[in-house]
Amino acid sequence: MSTVVIATVVGAPALRQESGEAHRGAVSLSEPSPAVRSLGLASGASGGPVTPTPSGASTSGSVSAAASIAASAASIGVAGALTADEDVANRMPPLGSLALLLLLPLLVGTNLVIVIPTADDYSHRLGGDQLFGGLMISSIPLGAWIGIYLNQWMLRGMSFKSVLIVITAGTIFGNVLYALAGLMCFKWTLLISRVVIGLCNGFSLPCMYISLTVGLKRRSEVVLYFSAATTLGYAVGPTLAAVLDVFLKSVRVHNLVLDSDTAPGWFMALLYLIFLVLIVIVFEDLPMHATQPGPRGSANAGDRFPLLSSCAAFWHLFVTSAQLTMAEVYLVFVGQQHWGWSIAKSALLLAGLMFCSGVINMSMGKLGQRIMRSDRAGLLGGSIFSCVACIPLSWSLKLQGVIAEVSVLSAGLLMLVALAGLNRAFALALTSKLVPSSLKRPMNEWATVMMTLGRAAGGVLGAVLNADSFAPAMLGLCVVSVVVSVASHKAMKPNDKAD
C-alpha cells in the first residue's frame, strides 16, 4: 500500500490553480520523491516489493518523515520568499529606458538655464526690464507646475510612452516660438514660449518612473543619479550659451532670426527632436494599468499622509530648488554687472560651477549608500554643512582683486550648490518611502510641485537680490532647513507599507 504525505507549511510559496485561486501553504506530495522512497514510505508506488513493517513503526516513521519533509519545505519556502523580497527590493527597469528617463532631467535643466546668460539682454531688447528677465527664467517652473496635472490627465487615456512623445513635441514647439520672439518684436512671446516649455517638460515623469520600476534598496542611488543629471543640465546650458555666442560672433551672424539671444531656442529644439527619435526607437512602454491615475479616494483604508515628515520633505525640496536657481542667476549677475564680463565668460564660469556640482552628486550615487546611515541622516548633515558654505558668501565681494573675489565666491557657491543637490536627492528619495504604496503617486506629484515652485521662486529672488542681501537670504534658508531637519528627524522613517 502506497503512502501519500500531505504537509502544511507556513510561509511556502502560493500554489495557483488554473482558475487563478491562490492556495498558500498547502504542499501536496502526490508523487514520492527518491528521498521518500529510500525511507520506505512509498515503496508501493514505485512498483517494487513492499517490506512489511509493524504498524506502530510504520506510523511512527511516517510521522517522523512527514515532519522532516514539512520542515524542509518550510525552510525552502522561507528562503524562496526572502529571495523574492530581495529581488523586488533590488529591481531595476531596462537600462535603455532608464537612461532616457535620466536624460530627460538633463534636457530640462539645460533648457531652463541656457537662457540665463542672455535673458537680461533679450528682455531689454524687446522692451522688458531686469524683473522681466527673472520672470522669463521662472516661467518654466510655473508652467511645469500646471504641467504636472496635465500629465496626470493625459495618462488617464494614453500610455506612458505616448505622453513622452506628445510633451517632447510640445517642447520643440515652445523652443521654436522662443527663437522667433525676436522676429515678432513682442516681449510677451518670450513668457508664452517659456510657459509652453514648462507645460511640456514632463519633470514629474522621471520621478514617477523611478518609483514604479526601481526597488527600495536601489531607489536612493537612482534618485541621486536623477539629481546629478539635473545639475549637469545646469552646467550644459550655460556652456552651450557661451559656445553659441562665440560661434555666432565668429561667423558674424546677427539678425532677427538667428543671434546670441535666439540661438538657444533653435538649438534646444534640435536636441529635443533627437530625443523624440530615441523615445520612439528605444523606450519600452509601461503597462497602462500601472501608470493610470486611480480615482480620488482610492487609497487603502487607514493609509494617511504623515503630516510632519511630509511637510519637512516638501520644505527641503522647495528650498534646495530655490537655492540652485538663486545661485545661478546671482553668479551671472555678478559676472556681468560687478566684474564686467561678457556673456560667454560669465556663462562658462556658471557651467564650470554646475559641472563640478553634478560630478559630486553623481559620485555620491554609490558612495552615499556606504557612508550614510539613512536618507534623513544625510539630509540633516547636508543642511548643517550648507550653513557653513554660506559664510564665504558674505565677504566674497569685499576682497581686493577680481581673482580673489572669483575664487572665494566660486568656492562658496560650489559647496552650497553641491549640498543643495545632495539634500534635494535625499529628500526626494524619502518622499517615496514615507508613505504606503497606495499614496506613492500623490506624494510624487506634491514633491514635483514643490521642486518646480522652488525653481520659480529662485528665479525671481536671484534677479532681485544684490551683493548685500544674497548671503543673508541664503543663510536664513539654510538655518531654517536645519531647524526643520532636527524637528522632523524622528518622524522621517520609511513606512512599513512602502515598496
Image: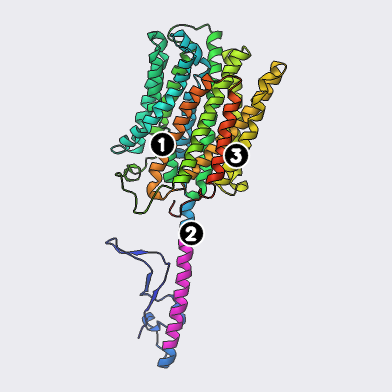
Q: Identity of the amino acid at label 3?
A: Gly
Q: Which residue is mark 3?
A: 382
Tell which circle, 2 or 1, labels the residue nearer the N-terminal end.
2
Q: Secondary structure at mark 1?
A: helix
Is 60 inside the magenta-drawn segment? Answer: yes
Which residue is more in the foreground, 328 or 264? 328
Q: In the rendering, at what x and y percent does residue 57 appear?
A: 44, 90
Judged from this view, the residue extending furthest toward the bottom is: 54
Q: Identity of the amino acid at label 1?
A: Leu
Q: Identity of the amino acid at label 2?
A: Thr
At x 48%, y 59%, the residue is 83
Q: Which residues are magenta?
A: 59-81
Q: Which residue is mark 1?
A: 205
Mark 3 packing: few (<14 Cα in 10 Å), some, or many (20+)? Answer: many
Q: Main secondary structure of the magenta part?
A: helix
Q: Which residue is mark 2?
A: 83
Q: CA distance from mark 2 to mark 3?
A: 34 Å
